[in-house]
Amino acid sequence: MKLISGKIVERLARYRTFLTEQAPGHRTHLFSHEIAAAMRTADSQVRRDLMAIGTQGVPRHGYEVDALMEKLDQALCLDRTHAVAVVGAGHLGRALIAFLEASRSTLCIKAAFDTDPATFGRVYSGVKCHSMASLEAVTAREGITLAILCVPASAAQGAADQLVGAGIRGILNFAPVALRVPVNVALEELVITTYLEKLAYFTTHPSKERRNGRHEER
Amino acid sequence: MKLISGKIVERLARYRTFLTEQAPGHRTHLFSHEIAAAMRTADSQVRRDLMAIGTQGVPRHGYEVDALMEKLDQALCLDRTHAVAVVGAGHLGRALIAFLEASRSTLCIKAAFDTDPATFGRVYSGVKCHSMASLEAVTAREGITLAILCVPASAAQGAADQLVGAGIRGILNFAPVALRVPVNVALEELVITTYLEKLAYFTTHPSKERRNGRHEER
DNA sequence: TCTTCTGTGTGATTCCGATCACAAAGAAGA
DNA sequence: TCTTCTTTGTGATCGGAATCACACAGAAGA
Ligand SMILES: NC(=O)c1ccc[n+]([C@@H]2O[C@H](COP(=O)([O-])OP(=O)(O)OC[C@H]3O[C@@H](n4cnc5c(N)ncnc54)[C@H](O)[C@@H]3O)[C@@H](O)[C@H]2O)c1
Ligand SMILES: NC(=O)c1ccc[n+]([C@@H]2O[C@H](COP(=O)([O-])OP(=O)(O)OC[C@H]3O[C@@H](n4cnc5c(N)ncnc54)[C@H](O)[C@@H]3O)[C@@H](O)[C@H]2O)c1
């Protein structure tokens, strides 16, 4: 199976959470237009995306839900577990730990790290917090490949460098700074305030707007 | 000034936080390529964006920082305050309240709302939590126009309907469901797990990836 | 078995954002 | 004042993603 673009991966992930959490349980098959309606996209978009992972449907019957779920898990590599570290056990870091531990997916938080000695050894929602000094050791021991960065902006690049040094393969950064990491390390940057600022802009501007790139009515 | 696309607004917001928080304070002017380097974009991209808000630079001198900041604030409508409500005072809601109250921007949290009676009347980081029943009254009294939705997925659509009924103009939704709101209400959906899933995909796939849509080395 | 009719699979097209490439501006130095 | 040289402003181009349009598949019913 060939490499899928980031945009398609995003939508596949959304289809997957829809199927697992919202789709009517009694249906064995679903039509592309039903998934599309729930996602507010076009049905042809859904079919294109599903084609990208080699799924095929049956005319007049749609897509078989179980087979589709299996394909999605496989395509998104969610059929294996991924060990994750949270770096920065502040407000946001602890909220994420609580949430991800509760949702019990294959994304599994194995450790938290912080520089504040008051947090060393503390356990948040079942996850133990370590000093940054032990990052490399704990990371190697637990087989951690992904990290969620929730430290202040001023500390973000330094923490990222440490993570890269410890052999992390991917970083999700919440600090509002553009990080520098080697090309072989995946990076996603998620600046929450940007979305609020977009809202501020589009609500105070009178004109009709396309909202998130999608056309729609009600 | 004409309407700016969502993509451009996002980048303008990033330029703005860069200028306020990271740019060297002693410089009175900055070149487009300096801003671009900090953002990991092309300099022509920065100039295009700045042109969209009618800023102009001086050849060999670059852009005057003060004037640029003023233009950005004005273009993004951040030169006035926006009253915001947080709906769902759980882990994520309280983290957001703590963060936004600490950052003291013109996005100002005026109230929190929840259905859990244990939260009624409680104050989180200086923000008082109310019952959902009082949503319309408090919203009108405080002049709240934006809402951040941090409720469980199953409650999200219902809460969004209440918000729309109360006259809210924009919603930032953290629940992993695609909400239905009238066209005249701005909507941003931010599903955090999607980003983690993208990381899982791109780290377990061997091939070279473009990471967040941008090419780069280092 | 044959016809009908709905939904899939996909080539073609459109649209939009990013990048390129270069002319024009104008500061600095002679 | 005139030349030089760097950076801006922007038309042109490129590429990718979303949408359209329709041929094809095949289940349902006669
Ligand atoms: N809280 C939110 O809702 C929110 C929203 C948007 C953005 N953010 C961003 O997320 C980041 C964290 O926010 P927060 O509200 O959790 O902040 P916080 O102050 O509550 O937590 C930060 C934590 O990071 C730790 N830390 C500091 N330097 C460190 C280092 N070098 N290595 C490891 N740990 C370190 C601190 O001890 C603290 O525990 C910030 O960059 C912020 O801009 C947070
Ligand atoms: N915590 C995170 O880091 C995180 C990460 C990703 C996504 N999310 C999403 O954010 C949302 C909230 O997450 P959380 O971890 O804060 O959950 P939480 O359970 O800690 O908080 C949810 C809060 O919403 C309140 N609530 C429930 N129904 C409500 C209603 N109809 N109206 C108003 N309030 C209501 C609950 O009383 C509770 O206080 C969820 O949809 C979750 O999927 C959270």
Image (spheres, coloured by chain):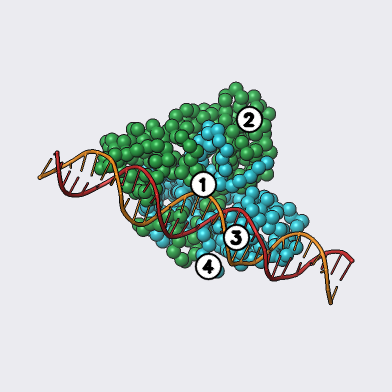
Chain colours: A green, B cyan, C red, D orange
Q: Are marks 2 and 1 on the same chain?
A: no
Which residue shows up at 26% across the image and 40% down it? Answer: A61
Which residue shows up at 64% across the image and 60% down it? Answer: B47
Q: Amino acid at mark 2?
A: Gly
Using the image, name the chain to which the residue with label 3 belongs: B
Q: Are marks 3 and 4 on the same chain?
A: yes
Numbered disc in front, either 2 or 1: 2
Secondary element at image label 4? loop
Which residue shows up at 66% across the image and 56% down it? Answer: B43
Numbered disc in front, either 1 or 3: 3
Judging by the rendered image, the residue that carries numbered circle 4 is: B2
Against B152, residue A215 (above or below) is below
Circle number at residue A167: 2
Q: Earlier in the sequence, mark 4 or mark 1?
A: 4
Secondary element at image label 1? strand
Residue B67: quarter of image: bottom right
Using the image, name the chain to which the residue with label 2 belongs: A
Q: Earlier in the sequence, mark 3 or mark 4?
A: 4
Classed neighbour count for the residue bearing mark 1: other residues with Cα under 10 Å, few (<14), some (14–19), many (≥20): few
Compute the Cα span from label 2 to label 1.
42 Å
Give the residue at the far top of this rendering. Answer: A141
Front residue of D23/B26: it is: D23
Against A141, residue B160 (above or below) is below
Judging by the rendered image, the residue that carries numbered circle 1 is: B123
Circle number at residue B88: none
